Amino acid sequence: MALSPSGALVVIHQVGERVRRGGTVRRRARRVAALGLGTLLVMTSLAPDAQAQGPRLDRRELQRSLDEIPKGGIVGAYSAVRDGWQRWRGAAGLADLDTKRPTRPDMYHRIGSITKTFVATAVLQQVERGRIQLDAPVETYQPGLLPDRRITVRMLLNHTSHLGDYDGVLLTSPDSLEELRVRQFTDEELVRLGLEAGPTGEPGQLPGSYSNTNYIVLGLLLDKVTGMSAERYITRHVIERAGLRHTFFPRTSHLPQPHSKAYTSAFGSFPLRDFSVFNMSWAGTAGAMVSTMEDLNRFFEALFAGRLISQARLAEMRTTVPITPGAGVTDTFEYGLGLVAYDVPCGRLWGHDGGVIGMVTLSVATLDGGRQASSGLNTTWHPGSEPGQNAWIIHTFGAVCGTGDAAEAARSGQPSAEIPLIDAYAPWRR
């Protein structure tokens, strides 16, 4: 089925953290909004922008920590790590439960909200060309699109517009997953649904509130100012410029080979079901892109090295504000212009995470982009998979910090090193 050039998906999650303190285990619930398995909250008292200094890649330990993921209830995982000239990639578990086909490191994967970083990069390129001003109202470029004329481009990028999100409108029950599998959306329809959801606050109010509607509007903005579709512009000026050969906006509901199946049970509502065939028109410029783990590392290397936007624009991108995962949630995390700041034991890392039904991804890098890790899972919203999700966090952040650091933090439960354990949370479970 042909896809429209836009769309978005958001699901709200509950983050359960188990932190060992004095021999006891404490569990806390946090709701985190992002595309699929959402933005990860990693709390620390370390100074901002500390530079992670990891040892040389320990390939044996990287594979060992990756192998822990399927042991914890995740069907399969794949990962790629880069440290200067050093490269490592690995896979663990199964890509297909029926045939027992194993995962491969080079599998194509739906990257969800990491798409937002590509979109933000494209918008900042237009800022450098003088075609967009960050603090100009959206009304300047798209008259009549948004009823509140106070909303600026910057507010869309950092989620302080307080535009409502449409996840609660679309994801109303487990049955809605099958309905969305074949449904076609336009950008304008998704914006309308976001507006119908109602605002979460006043434009510019802090904390902001995460909403995929923001990045659908940004896609429409790119359409207008570039004279071509946002997907085409991003492909030419971000993807190709970064030298990515396995990253694209999908034009069909099918993933290219090799790819894993995408499993979810919708929290046990039905047996694990494959959602790898899916019309992604509801994700578009908020989260429809497909990539590989190695390509994601190349993208963040190019971005942080200043090959896609200037260092001045990168500084804008890394200027964060507190935002909440969604309306009615009090926890906050630091969000820039299409970038998430992750504070971990070795310092502040930068990147994004995201997911769609059955697939979740995390890509993080040091400040200079010198050390990166990207990893993907092919299982979401499945009871009993929490240990595997926790192992995934330890593997990915440990790959950047030095493989022992994240695991040691999880064991010790130091206040400055809380490693979250993700438990997906969908709107119908509110």
Image (cartoon, grey):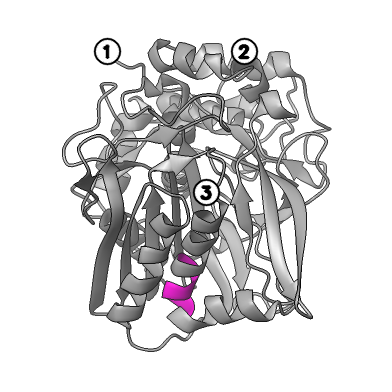
Looking at the picture, how far across and down is residue 298, in whole percent? Answer: 29, 61
Q: Secondary structure at mark 3?
A: loop
Residue at 65%, 64% in the rendered image: 42
Determine if residue 144 is in view.
no
Above or below, 397 against 247 in this view is: below
Chain-order first, disc 3 or disc 1: 1
Q: Residue at x 29, y 29 (%)?
A: 250
Q: What residue type is disc 1 on?
A: Met
Does 315 sit left or right of 28 as displayed?
left
- Residue receiving disc 3: 385
Q: Amino acid at mark 3?
A: Ser
> For this rendering, which residue is in front, 317 or 126?
317
Vertical position of residue 107 compared to residue 283: above or below? below
| Residue extent of the magenta highlight | 396-401
Q: Which residue is mark 2?
A: 192
Q: Which numbered disc flags the more N-terminal residue, 2 or 3?
A: 2
